[in-house]
Amino acid sequence: MSSEIRTIAGRSLSFSEMAEASRTGDPHHLSNCDLNGVDLTQLDFTGWCFETCNLTGASLKGVTLEDATLKGCRAGSIDLQGADLTDATMQGGDYSNANLRGAKLTHATIRNCKMTGANLSEVQAIGLTLEEVLFRLAVLPRFSFRKMTLTHVHVDFSDADLNRCDFRDAVLDDCSLRNTHLVDSRFENADLRGADLGGIMLTDMRRFKGATISKQQAATLLGQLGLQVF
């Protein structure tokens, strides 16, 4: 028997109210609620829906958001460190400067979100789906994109920290790697045709062994090494 979905709309909510709602074990649908700066550390929001809510500066460290939906939320500087977002959906929101360090994003979906300057260090991201995501200046060191397909989804990593990332066997056809930091990142057998590679510095060609790029991309990359292509 499925749990009852309870709806709360247009309210400012305190920690005590959210804790009480969490203890019921029932999923809640919060619509246009204000949780600006509220500390919700370690609470359980499994199956909840946060729609057009203000989560700016809220602390959700260690919370459970398994199978939850965050839709159209304002969540700049939200703290999701160590949160469990397994099978969760983040859609159409602003998560600029969010802290997702150590979060669990297994089989999660991030779609049409602004994540400028977000910190995704040490996340677990097996099966993560990315669509129309702005990761400019974001921090994603050691992130694994291995065998991931990013075609017709437009993911912008411009100026992001992608040091030691794994792009082996990935297909990057509709994303920007312009001016990204890629120290020790691996691209063996990746298909990079159609990706924006402007500003990338090739410090170790062995890490691109077997990768596929276009003639125009080859000219751009060689030009950045001071070589002229005719």
Image (cartoon, rainbow, N blue to C red):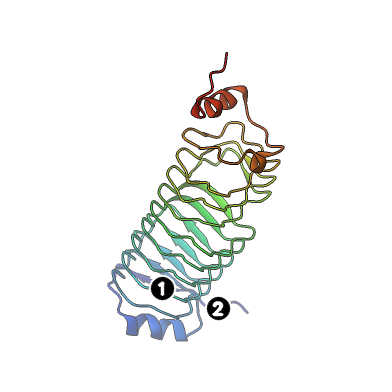
Residue closer to the observer: 186 or 30:
186
With 136 as the anchor, is 68 left or right in this view? Answer: right
Q: Residue at x 45, y 39 (%)?
A: 179
Q: Residue at x 51, y 83 (%)?
A: 25
Q: Of the two numbered discs 2 and 1 on the same chain, state the one appearing first in sequence.
A: 2
| Callout 1: SS | loop
Q: Position of residue 214 (x, y in %)?
A: 62, 26
Q: Position of residue 19 (x, y in %)?
A: 39, 84
Q: Residue at x 48, y 46 (%)?
A: 181
Q: Amino acid at mark 1?
A: Leu
Q: In the rendered image of this protein, does residue 9 appear above or below residue 218? A: below
With 10 as the anchor, is 197 left or right in this view? Answer: right
With 204 as the anchor, is 169 left or right in this view? Answer: right
Farthest residue in the top direction? Answer: 230
Residue closer to the observer: 65 or 220:
220
The quarter of the rendered structure image containing the C terminus is top right
User: How far apart in space, not on screen, are marks 2 and 1 (Cα)?
Assistant: 23 Å
Residue closer to the observer: 30 or 166:
166
- Name the residue carrying label 1: 60
Q: Quadrant of residue 74?
A: bottom left
Depth-wise, is mark 2 or mark 1 nearer the camera? 1
The quarter of the rendered structure image containing the N terminus is bottom right
The tally of labels here is: 2
Query: Quick one: label 2, few (<14), some, or many (20+) residues within 10 Å?
Result: few
The label number, if any, that marks residue 3 in the structure image: 2
Query: Quick one: label 1, few (<14), some, or many (20+) residues within 10 Å?
Result: many
Q: Amino acid at mark 2?
A: Ser
Q: Position of residue 12 (x, y in %)?
A: 27, 72
| Callout 2: SS | loop
Q: Position of residue 172 (x, y in %)?
A: 60, 40
Q: In the rendered image of this protein, does residue 199 appear above or below residue 218? A: below
Q: Residue at x 56, y 57 (%)?
A: 142
